[in-house]
Image: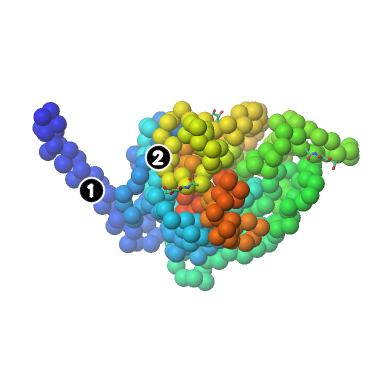
Amino acid sequence: MRILPLLPLLLSSLFLLRTLRLPTEISRSDPHQTLFDEAFAVSFRNGCDIFRGRWIREEDPLSRPPYTEESCRFLTRQVTCRRNGRPDSLYQQWRWKPHDCELPPFDPISLLQSLRNKRLMFVGDSIQRTQWESMVCLVESAVQGRRNKFVYRDPPRKIFFAKDFNASIEFYWAPFMVESNSDHATKHSVQRRVVRLDAIAEHSRRWEGVDVLVFESYIWWMYQPLINATIGTEEIKEYNVPRAYRLALQTWSKWVESSLNPQTQEAFFMTLSPTHLWSWEWRAGSNGNCYNESHPITNEEFRGAGSSLEIMEAVKEAVGGMKKMKVMILNITQLSEYRKDGHTSVFSERRGKLLTREQRSEPEVYADCIHWCLPGVPDTWNEILYAYLIYQSKG
Ligand SMILES: *[C@@H]1O[C@H](CO)[C@@H](O)[C@H](O)[C@H]1NC(C)=O
Ligand SMILES: *[C@@H]1O[C@H](CO)[C@@H](O)[C@H](O)[C@H]1NC(C)=O
Ligand SMILES: *[C@@H]1O[C@H](CO)[C@@H](O)[C@H](O)[C@H]1NC(C)=O
Ligand SMILES: *[C@@H]1O[C@H](CO)[C@@H](O)[C@H](O)[C@H]1NC(C)=O
């Protein structure tokens, strides 16, 4: 009874929302018009924490997913879960809603204009490669004509080039950020992994002059509690992982501080991408993994045991200790922690081959609960990166 009097008000505010949205739709018809979300700019400036929030099911098929497996020809087979046989598609329909504001709409033209005559580079492992693929798919619709956009390889890089904007969006393979014997762009499954904790120049010389750098490195460190590594000309030794990771971060941050120009360059660090290897973490008594999961976790307190707090601390300290260069930490860990449904599971490939029907029937052996389907969770990471790139200094 108490609700009814409010109804007219509710309806009129809905109407208001509709009319407010109108300019958005109009600008779509003009390919050079960009979108700027004033409301978000204000809340972002006032400190809205966009990493705290929840996943909301988006009913509007025009806004979620932001692209499809069919619409984006740049997707690789590793991530096209539906095409690889995944029966459900709900995982493509969630959008991230920060508690205190709304993420701004991702406008590909704004992003490409901000990258005009510039390079954006994602540095890291296969998780970063997926984020790169997601970014390519998020922007490519803004480039008219098949020939004006293409992906080419310059190992260890994969490069998307948008001709009209002279903009490149690149992926650089460096699973440990520092040098290692797993740095070959394709042949990196080596028997005895060795990381060179104090060596980065082989990579960093190819990062110099890049306008926007996005770093990430985690999962390759986490196979065992110890890792074989070297410092200088010393012999190979086993280091405990957090200690080795800290030393690598030191090497990395020294390079960032000495080589990047805070006036002309931007750097980001993506925090660890969580895994969902043990279903007992979210369903007590169960004994599976991410296979068959179709919904996000709704308990906001949920923390996954696979996400190392020590590594988190190390990143915070390394970045916090920088004096000259301000590296933005994009803390995507917690929001991704809820997405047990977003992984490629058995609908992906292994050593370059699609899983067979037999392999798919053994999810306890073959489910991949580390990598993500696209469209999917990494799109949100990029929407957040976008928010920083477009709104951080403006508004
Ligand atoms: C195209 O962009 C690159 C940087 O990515 C820049 O060095 C070059 O000068 C640009 N070309 C033109 C014609 O502006
Ligand atoms: C480090 O290398 C040695 C010698 O190859 C090997 O026996 C050991 O298992 C390796 N340790 C790790 C953590 O991989
Ligand atoms: C997966 O879900 C389907 C449908 O809900 C169910 O029939 C099947 O037993 C589940 N498989 C596993 C391994 O949990
Ligand atoms: C990321 O956020 C989580 C909580 O959501 C926090 O525990 C962690 O320390 C943060 N990591 C960094 C590197 O800021």
Tell me the residue that label 1 is attached to.
18
Mark 1 surroundings within 10 Å by alpha-carbon count, few (fewer than 14), some (14 through 19), many (20 or more): few
Task: Name which quarter of the figure residue 52 lies in.
Answer: top left
State the quadrant of the N terminus. Answer: top left
Count the marks: 2
Please state the horizontal and vertical placement of residue 97, each as a whole percent of the image: 38, 39
Tell me the residue that label 2 is attached to.
55
Pointer 1 and pointer 2: residues touching (CB < 8 Å)?
Answer: no
User: Relative to the observer, which residue lies in front, 381 or 80?
Assistant: 80
Which residue is found at the position 40% from the left and 40% from the top? 55
State the quadrant of the C terminus. Answer: top left
Mark 2 surroundings within 10 Å by alpha-carbon count, few (fewer than 14), some (14 through 19), many (20 or more): some
Please state the horizontal and vertical placement of residue 39, each as a whole percent of the image: 34, 39
| Amino acid on which the number 1 mark rests in the picture | Arg
Is residue 168 shown to the viewer in this render? no
Which residue is found at the position 11% from the left and 33% from the top? 4
User: Relative to the observer, which residue lies in front, 145 or 31?
Assistant: 145
Question: Helix, strand or loop at disc 2?
Answer: strand
Locate residue 229 relative to residue 82 in the image: left or right: right
Which residue is found at the position 54% from the left and 38% from the top? 287
Question: Helix, strand or loop at disc 1?
Answer: helix
Is residue 308 shown to the viewer in this render? yes
In the image, residue 336 sits, relative to residue 181, either above or below, namely: above
User: Relative to the observer, which residue lies in front, 27 or 351?
Assistant: 351
| Amino acid on which the number 2 mark rests in the picture | Trp
Please state the horizontal and vertical placement of residue 134, each as a whole percent of the image: 51, 53
Locate residue 95 relative to residue 231 in the image: left or right: left
Task: Name which quarter of the figure residue 6 lies in.
Answer: top left
Q: Is mark 2 within 8 Å of ligand 4?
A: no
